[in-house]
Image (spheres, rainbow, N blue to C red):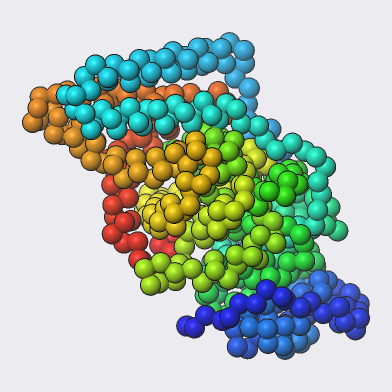
């Protein structure tokens, strides 16, 4: 399918008759259709666009009955504040965890320094071990200086954009949570994009529009990809800022206001919110992902944010300055790699397009939750897609990342190279060393377990959640399988399929 030429000057009709028709009866919906691009924009109370955002052709507008109001989707009204997800351990347990963490940190430093004494016995393995140890410890230390963007009372107009395909089970709840989040409705617009779904996703969107007539529904008659869904949301948005939310993510009260505070600084192009796992209680896999999510946000992204260099604003919940997005929209939408259009890794790619010239922050006080894979098969496919996008984007960002703050740049290049070397070092430490040279693997295994315990205790101390032990499950599966998946992703990087749909 040929790609439409992108225009960034969507015309919104202010025609008094159209506005009068829209507002005169809540039972009337306007369907604005572009035959060439095979898409429709459906509005009830919002101003109808007169031209297609992609090809600029005049839209064919027709009236149809609007969906009648229905009760909110399950789980929308049963909303809790952020505090219920975090629990105080108490003074005694907190002190015990803190002292144990300090001991483990000291032990880790001692172990790494001890490596120097035997450095030349296995120089390249010891160099890798020392580098990884220094990198991980530096993340904790730098994250200790992290401070969330302050609340300066910034309350601009914002458009929440949700692009999805085949998400009938969660899209209604996602939309309802946004309207109930608490941000002033006169400064909020919500745009949902149905990307050629084959289930009841569109019906759920129209039902939500019956409950919230200001909702704008975009219907792609055929699958165009998430990137096109995000793009049309940016082109239709009247707000000054964009907030991208995944269709299986749920914004917590007050988080829209909070995530926008970092964008009060004109040098900041985007802010990543903090996301926890919604379905954490399902099984060991979801608990493992909860630990991983928290550490990746509260340690890794927090450390990057200190230098304004967050490397990926996740699609779960991230805010952008619309003017910055529109400036790169055409290049991002039609990005190609090895001769093929990029069809995944949309969020990391957009982050890199902006990070080149702007600062990008993380706000741990802007909270959302998301549904994660509950089956290992789906999780494996998801991780393969994420790794492909990571590999692809390292070729793009690696050309200019060195211009950023020196610490941020060195950390980024280390985070790029070290995971690719990890499987080779593990084979040498666990197989070659013991079998060929008679060197025990205990030193390597002990170091890995020590670091895992350190970040697991960090998770326990910060959240109070009892499944801190799931951090060890992540380490075990990473060593046995997921570290090797990076090589598979490298070999299949030209694949364009999503993998989990």
Question: x, y (%) of residue 270?
Answer: 64, 51
Numbered disc total: 0
At x 38%, y 72%, the residue is: 339
Q: Please state, as top left, top right, bottom left or bottom right, where the C terminus lies in the image.
A: bottom left
At x 83%, y 71%, the residue is: 45
Position of 333 relative to 357 (above/below): below
Question: x, y (%) of residue 455?
Answer: 46, 28
At x 60%, y 65%, the residue is: 328
Question: x, y (%) of residue 127?
Answer: 28, 30
- In depth, the one of 195 and 336 nearer the eye is 336
Position of 164 relative to 28 (above/below): above
In this image, 9 relative to 437: left or right? right
Position of 144 relative to 166 (above/below): above
- In depth, the one of 66 and 36 nearer the eye is 36
Location of residue 142 by image quarter:
top right
Is residue 340 visible in this depiction of the protein? Answer: yes
Question: x, y (%) of residue 437?
Answer: 9, 27
Location of residue 433 by image quarter:
top left
Location of residue 42 by image quarter:
bottom right
At x 55%, y 58%, the residue is: 353
Is residue 21 visible in this depiction of the protein? Answer: no
- In depth, the one of 132 and 385 nearer the eye is 132
């Amino acid at each position: 399918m040929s790609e439409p030429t992108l225009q960034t000057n969507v015309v919104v009709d202010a025609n008094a008759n159209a506005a009068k028709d829209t507002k005169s009866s809540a039972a009337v919906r306007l369907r604005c259709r572009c035959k060439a691009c095979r898409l429709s924009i459906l509005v009830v109370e919002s101003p109808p666009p007169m031209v297609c955002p992609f090809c600029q052709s005049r839209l064919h507008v027709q009236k149809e009955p609007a969906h009648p109001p229905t009760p909110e989707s399950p789980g929308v009204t049963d909303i809790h504040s952020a505090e219920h997800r975090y629990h105080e351990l108490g003074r005694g347990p907190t002190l015990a965890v803190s002292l144990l963490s300090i001991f483990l940190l000291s032990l880790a430093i001692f172990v790494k320094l001890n490596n120097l004494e035997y450095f030349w016995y296995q120089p390249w393995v010891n160099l890798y071990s020392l580098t990884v140890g220094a990198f991980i410890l530096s993340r904790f230390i730098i994250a200790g200086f992290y401070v969330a963007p302050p609340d300066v009372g910034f309350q601009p107009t914002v458009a929440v954009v949700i692009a999805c395909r085949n998400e009938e089970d969660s899209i209604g709840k996602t939309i309802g949570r946004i309207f109930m989040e608490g941000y002033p409705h006169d400064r909020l617009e919500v745009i949902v994009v149905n990307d050629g779904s084959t289930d009841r996703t569109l019906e759920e969107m129209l039902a939500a529009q019956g409950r919230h007539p200001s909702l704008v529904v975009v219907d792609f008659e055929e699958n165009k990809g998430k990137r096109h869904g995000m793009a049309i949301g940016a082109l239709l948005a009247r707000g000054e800022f964009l907030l991208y939310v995944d269709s299986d993510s749920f914004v917590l009260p007050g988080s829209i206001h909070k995530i926008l505070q970092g964008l009060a600084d004109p040098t900041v192009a985007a802010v990543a919110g903090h996301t926890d796992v919604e379905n954490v209680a399902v099984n060991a896999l979801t608990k493992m992902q909860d630990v991983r999510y928290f550490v990746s946000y509260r340690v890794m992204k927090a450390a990057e944010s200190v230098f304004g260099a967050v490397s990926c604003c996740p699609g779960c919940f991230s805010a952008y300055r619309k003017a910055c997005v529109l400036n790169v929209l055409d290049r991002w939408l039609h990005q190609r790699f090895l001769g093929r259009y990029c069809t995944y890794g949309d969020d990391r790619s957009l982050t890199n397009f902006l990070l080149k010239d702007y600062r990008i922050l993380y706000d741990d006080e802007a909270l959302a939750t998301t549904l994660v894979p509950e089956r290992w098969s789906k999780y494996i496919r998801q991780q393969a897609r994420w790794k492909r996008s990571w590999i692809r984007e390292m070729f793009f960002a690696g050309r200019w990342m060195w211009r950023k703050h020196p610490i941020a740049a060195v950390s980024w290049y280390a985070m790029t190279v070290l995971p690719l070397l990890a499987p080779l070092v593990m084979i040498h430490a666990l197989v070659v060393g013991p079998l060929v040279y008679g060197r025990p693997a205990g030193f390597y295994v002990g170091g890995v377990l020590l670091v895992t315990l350190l970040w697991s205790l960090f998770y326990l101390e910060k959240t109070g959640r009892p499944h801190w032990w799931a951090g060890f499950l992540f380490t075990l599966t990473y060593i046995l399988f997921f570290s090797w998946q990076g090589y598979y992703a490298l070999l299949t990087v030209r694949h364009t399929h999503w993998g989990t749909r």
